[in-house]
Image (cartoon, grey):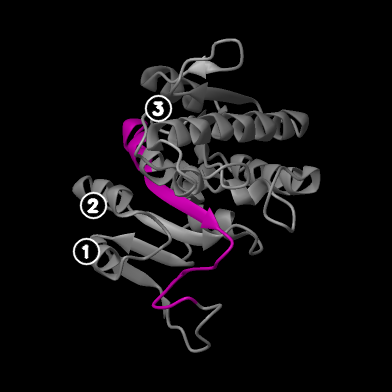
Amino acid sequence: MNEAELKYKRILLKLGGEALAGVDGYGIDAHRLEEVAAVIKGVKACGVEMAIVIGAGNIWRGKDGVAQGMDRSTADHMGMLATVINALALQDALETSGVTTRVQTAIEMRALAEPYIRLRTIRHLEKGRVVIVGAGTGNPYFTTDTAAALRAMEVDAEVLIKATKVDAVYDADPEMVADAKKLECLTYLEALELRVGIMDSTAISLCMDHNLPIVVINLWERDSLIRVVRGERLGTVVCAG
């Protein structure tokens, strides 16, 4: 595939931390890392410029700390640090597979990664490097979904792709409701009204305000990411309508 065949040439890929976990959903699994790196490498080989925001659900969830009585800001900062662990692990897997990668963080930790600087990120993308952005927005009370929406707009990404373990957004939990209906297309307002659990309302509102399309896909479905950047309708598209 050459670049002329691509619908999206610069994307922001949002990965949950669970993408790196083993079957129990926790920690970092070496085989999963290799699989994720292979998917990213395949898309990168098509000429796509890619920034990645990664979560930390496989290591720590701030809401779990709050539920145990922890201060919200402390719990969220712990989550930001956990995303950096995931970012470094993914960088290592990508570099091992031959993909030049940079990790940037919203909280400065120069011994480990570059600080997030918008123009530097764009320059890396233009040079063909994959950029993984860790530490969320650098602020508590904001999810990595919101960080993904923010970074996507800052680097002029053409689409935000939310890659999960489900193949689309449904009108009910498909694991709980046998006849849950798959929703192939939603407007931003419909997504907000339905309170779809796939992305938080702040992130959706931010995308709506700046007309940034969101595509929800199953990362593990064969060639799903390549098919989306090529323009194939897949999963659920959230847009202006």
Q: Three-letter amino acid code at disc 3?
A: Gly
Q: Is residue 230 visible?
A: no
Q: Position of residue 17 (x, y in %)?
A: 59, 46
| Quarter of the image where one finds residue 34 | top right
Viewer-side residue, 146 vs 231: 146
Viewer-side residue, 10 vs 2: 10
Q: Three-letter amino acid code at disc 1?
A: Leu
Q: Position of residue 179 (x, y in %)?
A: 48, 89
Q: Position of residue 5 (x, y in %)?
A: 50, 51
Disc 2 from disc 3: Cα separation:
22 Å
> What residue is disc 2 on?
208
Q: Farthest right residue?
A: 31
Q: Secondary structure at mark 2?
A: helix
Left or right of 197? Residue 86 is right
**Residue name at image x 66 percent, y 35 percent:** 90
Q: Earlier in the sequence, mark 1 or mark 3?
A: 3
Q: Position of residue 54 (x, y in %)?
A: 53, 40
> What residue is disc 3 on?
138
Count residues near mark 2 (Cα–Cα under 10 Å), then give few for <14, some for 14-19, many for 20+.
some
**Residue name at image x 31 percent, y 65 percent:** 195
| Quarter of the image where one finds residue 154 | top left
Residues rendered magenta in the picture: 149-173
- Residue 239 is marked as none
Left or right of 160? Residue 30 is right
> What residue is disc 1 on?
189
Q: Quadrant of the C terminus?
A: bottom left
Q: Earlier in the sequence, mark 2 or mark 3?
A: 3
Callout 2–callout 1 Cβ contact below 8 Å: yes
Left or right of 104? Residue 44 is right
Q: Three-letter amino acid code at disc 2?
A: Met
